[in-house]
Amino acid sequence: MSCDTHAMVVVHRVFTREFRLLGEIAAATPPSDAEQIRRVVRHGREMLTALHHHHHSEDELVWPRLRSASIDPALVDSMESQHGAIGAAMEAVDAALTGWESDGTAGEQVTVASSRLHAVLAEHLHDEEQIVLPLVAETLTESEWAELGERGMASLPKRRALVFLGHILEEADPIERENFIRDIPGPVRFLYRFLGAPAHARETRALRRDLTPTRTERAAS
């Protein structure tokens, strides 16, 4: 019994990239540009919501199954503890976004909070990919693993899920892209091609417009 967990690594890139860029975008956004601030705040909150559902699904579908399989309880405890620390950092980012939305000069608070979230999140995701996912691959069935992905995409409104798919595929190599697309129903692939991909390109271009070329290029590195 084993399942291919690499798709999770591809999804993780979305969160590490977008929360790193969130702070950079906030720092580059003019305080007087209310429209851009609203756009960035909306994007930041959508990423927070997606990360919340991602971790909530793990809390319900992964950690209990690892415990039932007699995986080292200290490891599972550590993962749950890291989720708690990430949750606190997410709340700080959400509060900073609220403050920035009402005061355009408060973008630095978003930059600081996003940097802190990125740090704790990157550490957790590294541990999860290096230590936990190999155990998950040998513990969960393919159907149990598929349930995690299905719940994650279902947590977003359908049109936004199509755009989020664009975020997932943004840094995927050709093999990763092929594997990810292969498991998506035909009608969804069609909608992604004609709705999701163009919307993702349009939105990311607007979000990152004030970044220097070097920073923008880093988003796809």
Image: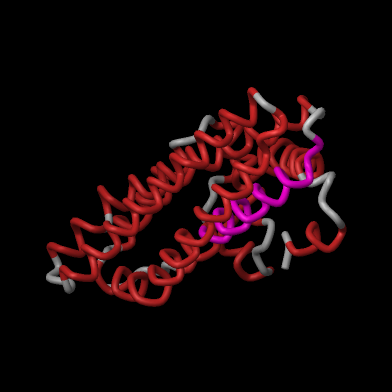
Quadrant the C terminus occupies: bottom right
Given residues 165 and 19, the one toward you in this image is: 19
Residue at 68 percent of width and 36 percent of height: 40
Task: Measuring from the top left, give residue 181's x and y in whole percent.
Answer: 60, 55
Is residue 16 found inside the magenta-colored segment of the image? yes
As displayed, is residue 200 above or below residue 213? above
Point 84% across, 45% down: residue: 210
Q: Is 135 drawn above or below residue 166 in the view shown?
A: below
Magenta-drawn stretch, dominant element (helix, strand or loop): helix
Taking the spot 44% from the left edge, 48% from the top edge, the residue there is 89
Res 41 → quadrant:
top right
Left or right relative to 205: residue 41: left
Estimate the x, y position of residue 39 in percent, counting from the top left: 71, 31
Q: How is the image coloured?
A: secondary structure
Percent across and percent down for residue 219 are 72, 59
- Lateral position of residue 92 relative to residue 179, left or right: left
Residue sitting farthest toward the top:
102
Span shown in magenta = 12-30
Q: In the image, residue 104 lies at what x, y percent? A: 71, 29
Q: Residue at x 67, y 26 (%)?
A: 103
Q: Is residue 57 above or below residue 182?
A: above
Specify whether residue 91 is painted magenta. no
Q: Is 32 positioned to the left or the right of 99 in the image?
A: right
Which quadrant, please, contains the N terminus? bottom left
Callout count = 0
